[in-house]
C-alpha cells in the first residue's frame, strides 16, 4: 500500500482571495485574462507560492490606485518571479498618491467579520465585479436581512465616515458600492414558497416611497427585496415622491401599509404622516385605511402622529409588515 501523497505546498485560490480581500473569481479572472496565475499539473488544484501571492498583492496595490487592470498586469509581469522584486517594485512603477485625510486607504469597519473587510477592500479598489460577487454570495446564503445588517450596511456606514473625514473624497466609492448593492438586491431569486398547510397573514399591498425631497432610498430597496422573498406584494415608488402623488397612489391602490423613508431631518415632514394615516376609502360603513410607518434616521427625535409606527431596523420592518393588520 503506497504512502499518502503529501499535501501540495502553497495556498489555495480561496485562501489567496481571503488574504487579498478579493473574490476567488477575481483571482481566477486575473490568471485567465492576464497570465498572473501559476503553472499546475493536470488534475491538480491551483496552489499559490509566496512569489505568486506577492505578484497578486502588487496587482491589488496598482488597481487600488486607479491603474487599469490590463496595465497593472503588464507591470506585474515585468517584475519577474523574484519575491523581493515584486514586494519592492521600481519607484516609477507605482505613481505617487497624495496622503488622504481619514487614515489612509482603509475603510473603518472596526471588528467586523472577514466578509465586511473583504467587501471594504474591494470597494476601495473600485472592484465592482468583486463587490457584486461578495454580495450575491451572501444574499444566496443568508438572505436579505442578514446581508444588509451584517455586511452591506456596515460597509456603507464606513464609507460615509471615510467620506466625512476625507474632505469629500471617496464619494466615488460610496456611489459604486450603493449601485452594486442595488443591483444585487434586484437579482434576488423568486420568493420562497409558502406552506399551503398553514394560515398565512395577508397584509395587502405595501407601498414604499421616499418622502418629498428625499433622494436616498437604498434601504427601501433592501426592504422591498426582503418582503418579496416572503411573498409580500410591494409597490416601490422610489425617491422624492411628491405628497399629492403619495396620497393618490395610496387611495388608488388601497395599500394595506405605507413606509415613508427619510434620511435626514429636512425631509422628515410629520404633517405628511398625519395626512397619510388619515386616509380612508371604500363604501360607507366599510371604510378602510392604511398602516403608516416612518423609517430612516430623519425621523429620530420627532414626535410622530398617533397610529404611526417607527421602524428602526430592517428585521423589525419585515416582521411588522408581514404580520396581521
Image: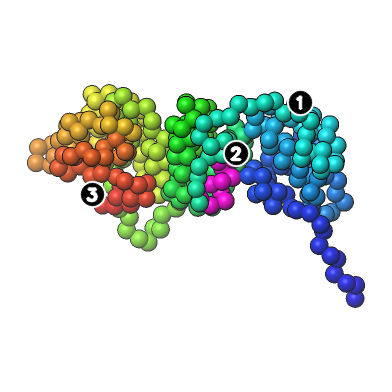
Task: Give the residues drawn in magenta, as a range.
Answer: 112-121
Which residue is painted at 47% across and 40% down in the image?
Answer: 158
- In the rendered image, residue 319, in percent from the top left (x then y), is placed at 33, 52
160 within the magenta span: no
Q: How far apart are marks 3 and 1 (CA)?
A: 66 Å
Determine contact: label 3, label 2, CB under 8 Å.
Answer: no
Residue at image mark 1: 92
The crowd level at tag 1 (other Cα within 10 Å; few <14, some 14-19, many 20+) is few
Residue at image mark 3: 325
- In the rendered image, residue 266, in percent from the top left (x then y), is placed at 27, 28
Q: Earlier in the sequence, mark 2 or mark 1?
A: 1
Q: Which colour scheme is used?
A: rainbow
Q: Distance between the residues labelled 3 and 2?
A: 42 Å
The crowd level at tag 2 (other Cα within 10 Å; few <14, some 14-19, many 20+) is many
Q: Is mark 2 on a helix, strand or loop?
A: helix
63 and 242: which is toward the camera: 63
58 and 166: which is toward the camera: 166
Main SS, magenta region, reads helix
* Residue 122: numbered disc: 2
- In the rendered image, residue 251, in percent from the top left (x then y), is placed at 22, 32
Amino acid at each position: 500500500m503506497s504512502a499518502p501523497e503529501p499535501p501540495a505546498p502553497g495556498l489555495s485560490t480561496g485562501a489567496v482571495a481571503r488574504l487579498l480581500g478579493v473574490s476567488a473569481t477575481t483571482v481566477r479572472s486575473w490568471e485567465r485574462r492576464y497570465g498572473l496565475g501559476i503553472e499546475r499539473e493536470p488534475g491538480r488544484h491551483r496552489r499559490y507560492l509566496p512569489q505568486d501571492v506577492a505578484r497578486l498583492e502588487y496587482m491589488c496595490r496598482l488597481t487600488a490606485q486607479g491603474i487599469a487592470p490590463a496595465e497593472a498586469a503588464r507591470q506585474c509581469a515585468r517584475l519577474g518571479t523574484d519575491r523581493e522584486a515584486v514586494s519592492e517594485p521600481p519607484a516609477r512603477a507605482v505613481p505617487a498618491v497624495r496622503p488622504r485625510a481619514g487614515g489612509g486607504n482603509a475603510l473603518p469597519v472596526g471588528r467586523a467579520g472577514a466578509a465586511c473587510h473583504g467587501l471594504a477592500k474591494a470597494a476601495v479598489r473600485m472592484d465592482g465585479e468583486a463587490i457584486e460577487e461578495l454580495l450575491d454570495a451572501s444574499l444566496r446564503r443568508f438572505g436579505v436581512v442578514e446581508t444588509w445588517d451584517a455586511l452591506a450596511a456596515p460597509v456603507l456606514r464606513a464609507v460615509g465616515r471615510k467620506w466625512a473625514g476625507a474632505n469629500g473624497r471617496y464619494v466615488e466609492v460610496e456611489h459604486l458600492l450603493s449601485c452594486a448593492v442595488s443591483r444585487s438586491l434586484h437579482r434576488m431569486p423568486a420568493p420562497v414558497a409558502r406552506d399551503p398547510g398553514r394560515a398565512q397573514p395577508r397584509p395587502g399591498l405595501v407601498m414604499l416611497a421616499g418622502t418629498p425631497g428625499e433622494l436616498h432610498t437604498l434601504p427601501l430597496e433592501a426592504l422591498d427585496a426582503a418582503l418579496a422573498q416572503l411573498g409580500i406584494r410591494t409597490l416601490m415608488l422610489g425617491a422624492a415622491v411628491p405628497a399629492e402623488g403619495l396620497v393618490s397612489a395610496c387611495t388608488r391602490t388601497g395599500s394595506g401599509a405605507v413606509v415613508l423613508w427619510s434620511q435626514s431631518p429636512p425631509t422628515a415632514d410629520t404633517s405628511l404622516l398625519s395626512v397619510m394615516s388619515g386616509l380612508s376609502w371604500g363604501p360607507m360603513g366599510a371604510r378602510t385605511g392604511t398602516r403608516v410607518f416612518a423609517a430612516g434616521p430623519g425621523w429620530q427625535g420627532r414626535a410622530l402622529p398617533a397610529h404611526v409606527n417607527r421602524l428602526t431596523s430592517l428585521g423589525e420592518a419585515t416582521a411588522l409588515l408581514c404580520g396581521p393588520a
